Image (spheres, rainbow, N blue to C red):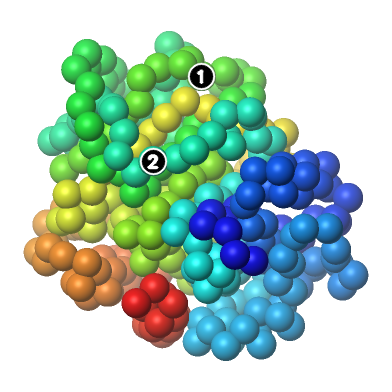
Amino acid sequence: MNSNISLVITSISHPENKVLQDYARKTSQHGFNYIIAGDEKSPEDFFIEGCHFLSLKRQRESGFSLAELLPTRHYARKNIGYLEAMRAGSHIIVETDDDNYAKADFWEKREACVQARLYENEGWLNVFKLFSEQNIWPRGFSLKHINNIPENKSVEQSCYCPIQQGLADENPDVDAIYRMILPLPVTFGQAPNVVIGNHTWCPFNSQNTTWFKEAFPLMYLPSYCSFRMTDIWRSFVAQRICWENEMGVLFHHATVWQERNEHDLLVDFRDEFIGYMNNNILVERLNALTLRKGAEHIPANLLACYQVFIDMNLIAEKELDLLHAWIEDVYLLTK
């Protein structure tokens, strides 16, 4: 692997999975590294031409401090895929899932500086409503604010956004409440780019997300928490630290569409309930933190943010061992 850009997925699917096969063909065509992090249920003989598959054995032999600490049967195995992409020398990491098909513009060149409408000091901002007239909100969004209608700003400006969330058509990443009471599929509009900046919150997921090198330390997915919250709570941490470094989080039009894997919506609801009940106070406490500006302070800022989750009994304290290992691995790879 020697590409400047890597695509990372975690999956336990059979290699005949149509999405995984489609990405194999297209990453080869477009010059991406293609990395899949497996787990306990992954087929032992998993092979796709052009794919760098990380079995549990290969993960544990990787030399990464984090590899031995991560629990199995968990989406956070994806962290090893991120680290492998960094080791390959990638300056851009794109992540998605094994039920998201890439549209043609998914493969277009990505830039960290973009023209966008900037939102600051908004509190909770439902970005989905800026791309759709439907009553829709992203997974992890505050239920107290789902009926808020954001102002549609007309002025665009150049914004530095090393984290970029693309939307997903057909079956976007909404919560279990939405899925049980409101209609799907959904097709988002081709609205202008949106950037959330200081003191503005909108969860982003791991479904269609681009990370530039400056933001790599913020990719960490926590393990000892609700499965349905791991990427959402990561997004709150990333947003909070971005404020200290003059970095925005970009949301742009859908460049994937999803054929969602089978889910039990009541199980999803159970796993999301902790977020429904705590995300408001969580972001208030993250907002109140005193963090320090500069890339050299990102490790300390990460630890301070995750300590908030631990103090609220949302994440187990043993998460800090994994986070320390992540920080060690990332900074050895990116120094």
Disc number lying in front (1 or 2):
2
The residue at the point 53 percent across, 42 percent down is: 208
Q: Which residue is mark 2?
A: 111
Quadrant in the rendering for residue 104: top right
Q: Is tag 1's residue or tag 2's residue first in the polypeptide sequence?
A: 2
| x then y, percent, for residue 148 | 28, 22
| Mark 1: few/some/many CA within 10 Å (<14, 14-19, 20+) | some
* In the rendered image, the vertical position of residue 157 relative to residue 229, given as above or below: above
Residue 317 visible in image: no
At label 2, counting other C-alpha atoms closer than 10 Å, the crowd grade (few under 14, some 14-19, many 20 or more) is few
Classify the position of the C terminus by image quarter: bottom left
Q: Is residue 254 left or right of residue 151?
A: right
Q: Amino acid at mark 1?
A: Phe
Q: Quadrant of the N terminus?
A: bottom right
Q: Residue at x 15, y 56 (%)?
A: 244
Q: Is residue 149 above or below residue 200?
A: above
Residue 188 is labelled as 1
Q: Is residue 318 left or right of residue 214?
A: right
Q: Nearer the viewer, residue 83 or 123?
A: 83
Q: Residue at x 34, y 44 (%)?
A: 112
Give the left or right position of residue 214, taking residue 321 as reference.
left
On the image, the x and y values in percent for residue 317 come to: 37, 79
In the rendering, at what x and y percent does residue 295 appear? Answer: 22, 67
The quadrant where residue 33 appears: bottom right
Using the image as rendered, state which of residue 4 and residue 9 is in the foreground.
4
Image height of 76 relative to 129, above or below = below
Please, what secondary structure does the residue beneath circle 1 have?
loop
